[in-house]
Image: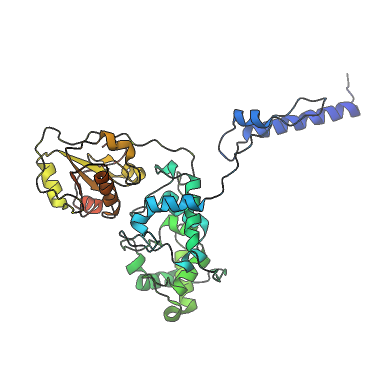
Amino acid sequence: MKRFMTPARSALLATLAVAVVLGACNRGRSSPSGAASASAQASHGALAAPSAHPALPSLPSAAPELPASTERGRELYGRMCAVCHGANGEGYRADGAPTLSQPAYLASVSDDFLDFAIAIGRPRTTMAAWRTDQGGPLSAWDIKSVIAFLRTWQGPPVKLDEGYVHGDAVRGKALFVKECESCHGAKAKNVHILSRQWLTFAKTPFIRYAIANGRPSTPMKAFSASLGADRIEEILGYMRSLPAWLAPGEVAGSIRPPPIPLGPVPLNPKGPAPVGFRPYPAMTPLSVIWRELQRHARIGILDARTSSDYTTLHIEGAVSVPFYDPSPYLDDLPRREWLVCYCGCPHSESGALAQQLLNAGFTKVTVLDEGFGAWTAAGHPTRNGQTP
């Protein structure tokens, strides 16, 4: 029997179809904060529905994003960043930690660039990853607040050339090797400007301005006179031919990991007392520390870096006690044994941790003088993960 579609029936089916589609969309969509929250639905309620049809499920409302706090950023910078970058952002308190307070730099750099550098760090440098999903202590809001504080050092706006890159990559590579590699190459101590992550967020106008104008009061000189605009474009052509993308795990997460549990301290608890250690602020050479470990002396080795750095690679047998917050570990550290602090810069962070231990009443505290880099260069044992 043939059924005819009446206008009323057609309208009803159309309404039901829209409801099904919208319901499916709503079920598949998550809030910007990451997950559909039953409590958010309960607190905000569902929209009132037409009387003839059931209510569609409401989208969860995301919590409003807190505005960045300059004062919070000032506190965090002083606690976590100043040991390497200087109290006033002057830089080079530790190996390779660049100047951050240069006004023209801040006037030309984007928030995205600064955010990613703080969050993910700079692999194969002493700049650690600080965001919580990377094993660091800072939330996304904390990082935005640090950036807001950095912006207080910013100078007046600078004029950026937004034009397309028209340089030749082959000629640019030769120029880069000649003019830039000694400072910015893979083995150089200054900013590694060819890294994949750096190139992802370093916008072309920002790079062009830096090459042409330099960074006054820093080692970066201006090249506009010596190279000229055309040869600067050649270098840009080379840099823009290199990989610039993000790997899995480099996007923001939302989980703050708990402190890494403290492992056994000291090593060799039944061994002899170490000989030749120098109490902080004096430091103890790597050769002495290694000799005493070979003697199976009683030594606690404390990694002062961020927990993300510790998880990536650390001295075998070392425990994680980050310099910026040693308080969760103080009650469990032995006060009658020698504690050796180390970091990679080579002793800004370890020195900060050592001073806090002294302030807390510890007396047998020293610092590995040459730092973690010397340990790995010597081929001494290391581990990754959270196990000492």
Q: Residue at x 14, y 50 (%)?
A: 278
| Residue 202 visible within the image | no
| Residue 63 visible within the image | yes
For residue 221, above or below residue 27: below
Query: Quarter-wise, where is residue 39 in the image?
Result: top right
Q: Residue at x 15, y 35 (%)?
A: 268
Looking at the rendered image, the quarter that the N terminus falls into is top right
Instruction: Report the label total.
Output: 0
**Closest to the observer, 360 or 261:** 360
Residue 60 placement (x, y as % from top left): 64, 34
For residue 354, above or below residue 184: above
Q: How is the image coloured?
A: rainbow
Q: Is residue 371 left or right of residue 84?
A: left
For residue 282, above or below residue 44: below
Q: Residue at x 50, y 53 (%)?
A: 70
Q: Residue furthest bottom?
A: 225
**Closest to the observer, 383 or 167:** 383
Q: Residue at x 48, y 41 (%)?
A: 253
Residue 364 placement (x, y as % from top left): 17, 44
Looking at the rendered image, the quarter that the C terminus falls into is top left
Q: Is residue 159 left or right of residue 132?
A: right
**Closest to the observer, 156 or 78:** 78
Residue 147 placement (x, y as % from top left): 48, 55
Residue 79 placement (x, y as % from top left): 38, 50
